Amino acid sequence: MAVITYREALNQALREEMQRDPDVFLMGEEVAEYDGAYKVSRGLHKEFGGMRVVDTPIAELGFAGIGVGAAMVGLRPVIEFMTWNFALLAIDQVVNSAAKLRYMSGGQIGCPIVFRGPGGAALQLGAQHSQSLESWYAHIPGLKVVMPGTPADAKGLLKSAIRDDDPVVFIEGEMLYNVKGEVPEEAEFLIPIGQAEVKRAGTDVTIVCHSKMVTVGLKAAEQLAAEGINAEVVDLRTIRPLDTETVLASVAKTNRCVVLEEGWSFAGVGAQVVDVVQREAFDWLDAPILRVTGADVPMPYNKHLEKAAKVDVTKAIAAVKQVLYLA
Amino acid sequence: MATSAAPKPRAGGALPADELRSYLRQMLLIRRFEERAGEAYSLGKIGGFCHLYIGQEALAVGTIAALRPDDYVIGAYREHGQALARGMSARSVMAELFGKLTGCSHGKGGSMHLFDAGRNFMGGHGIVGGQIPLAAGFGFAIKYRQGDQVVACYFGEAAVNIGSFHEALNMASLWQLPVVFIIENNGYGMGTALARASSILDLSHRAYSYAMANEMVDGQDVLTVKAAMEKAVDRARQEQKPTLLEIRTYRYVGHSMSDAAHGTYRTKEEVEQYRQRDPILLLRDRMLGDGLIDQAGYDGLEKDVIAEVEDAAAFADASPDPDPAELFTDVYAPRQ
């Protein structure tokens, strides 16, 4: 297996799917001649030309809708948002068109489209560029929401998303693009949408996480191991449909659960996880489930304040110790 | 004004009688269908919003007459007229308004979301301007596949003030997409008169911002509408270029079912004045004058249309509701 970055894994997925299916095209701001704002589309314009790798004006609502229209008549668009913060301008087309066309048309018109781009906070980008909005999209029936935390998941899930017949919101980790990992090289390396993965097996506590929080969860588990606490780390990978079976099986084993989430607490993804676990695994729980989330504020610019707002290993470990009644 | 093609003769005499008769029948069908829908609404057979097309019939009939069956049609939420003009049966449309399984969207869409994939009728859409980028997307797909189809995209004049209109028209012109953007200018966005909402009143001029061909058209004369649409369709099909048509029309009824036809934002006199140029009477009188139909022929046509509408209403009434299990189908694609 090759060791490549998360960015390269996404690039491979796009290239392979575009080679495989002539109906797949990539559209967004700076995706073609500039090779991508985050270089995810590097080399694709040169290989596939301007009809399949399409630079757009700065008009998120317009080009998201053009993608939805193209998908309605059978193409397989991949629409890149430079970041998911800017995608708020396009949310009408994602929520009111893409998610609802199949239902409103009584099953006649599908929408096989991928909306993708980076989400979550990077470093000191301020309030408007540092948001985790996955729970907004996960709220909507008709959408699938996918958030890979490793290079292998990024590749296998993007390939599955492009082949999926439903609209997929694919949120990449802005801070993960340079993370390296082993990625299988075979062309049919696909990871099914809707399957969580136990990234680290353990017996004492379940840490549920996704995207960038997988790195935080694994680091926390490593440090906890040194103290004799054996944590299991469950990476959701897909937010909708949520793989509740894997989460419940883990909690049934560990009897304790902490949910990490980069975004805000209110109506967040973790709230949905907690809802399922308390209802379906109530008798297995030995402690209330705790959530560790971003601070309930717009992201500050000052680096000390920003650090205080973010979920980190220290906060995750503190929550784990609390559910173990060690704190 | 559009410049590329020489204007075709406005005709009347140049068009065969059976073609004119077909337009007359389609307009009558829409009129009587909508009147029947209004009745059914007041009886509680139709729920939610219901935006009637009465007064605007020549617009849908004249534009769709210029299309091929494999062209795409997409509209807003006042789209019963386009659906019928596109050849969707009165039964399937009425049943959809009644929310029945036999409706064109199987009872899941309703008045604002009529779909017929087989006729490339790509929906009524309920968010103002939302369908305009979708139409550009169909145009992009046609270009991508090097096809020669054309897209007809309908929206009210109030939609020209929303961002999706500007974003989609800019890209449609930038990328030369085969789309005819059709402003159905009936003078009012709900109760807001055009002059209170738009900084310019000649809405076709908006196209100049996008270097796009454009034309202002009298929407009450079905033959004028058809001639203008033919030019725009030719431009799209032959030259892969978009056009913005501003077609001026008028709705005699309220915006939806809850508001009166007049009294608040417009006067009874104004509505009466527009009724003097009724699209159906205009064509009927021309045909009577040219000897292409006589009064008995017209009466027969109307009788025939009324029978079709009554049949549609009876069919809709007798049709079953969707099975309760249908609640959870069509949210996602069936598993492959």
Image (cartoon, coloured by chain):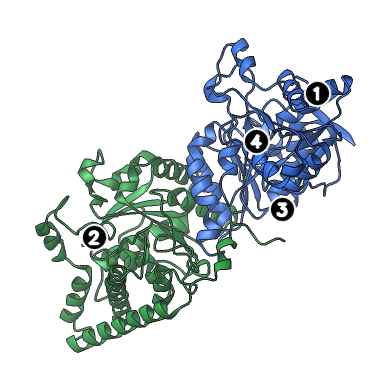
Chain colours: A blue, B green
- Would you place residue B132 above or below residue A214 in this image? below
Of the image marks 4 and 3, the number of the one nearer the N terminus: 3
- Residue A142 % position (x, y): 58, 52
Under mark 1, the amino acid is: Lys
Same chain assignment for discs 3 and 2: no
Residue located beneath label 3 in the image: A21
The mark closer to the camera, 3 or 1, is 1
Tell me whether marks 4 and 1 sit on the same chain.
yes
Relative to the observer, which residue lies in front, B60 or A85? A85
Q: Is residue A54 visible?
A: no
Mark 4–mark 1 contact, CB under 8 Å? Answer: no
Q: Which mark is residue A271?
A: none
Mark whose residue sits in front, 2 or 4: 4
Q: Are marks 2 and 4 in contact (CB under 8 Å)?
A: no
Q: Residue at x 48, y 76 (%)?
A: B320
Query: Which SS class for mark 4?
Result: helix
For disc 2, the marked residue is B251
What's the mark number on residue A270?
A: 4
Callout 2 secondary element: loop
Q: Are marks 3 and 2 in contact (CB under 8 Å)?
A: no
Q: Is residue B54 above or below residue A190?
A: below
State whether discs 2 and 4 lie on one chain.
no
- Measure the C-alpha gap from mark 4 to mark 3: 36 Å
> Mark 3 near mark 1, Cβ–Cβ under 8 Å?
no
How far apart marks 3 and 2 lie (CA) works out to: 47 Å
Residue under mark 3: which chain is it in?
A: A
Q: Residue furthest left?
A: B269
* For residue A286, side relative to residue B76 (left or right): right
Judging by the rendered image, the residue that carries numbered circle 1 is A219
Side of A91 relative to B15 (left or right): right
Q: Residue under mark 2: which chain is it in? A: B
Q: Closer to us: mark 1 or mark 2?
A: 1
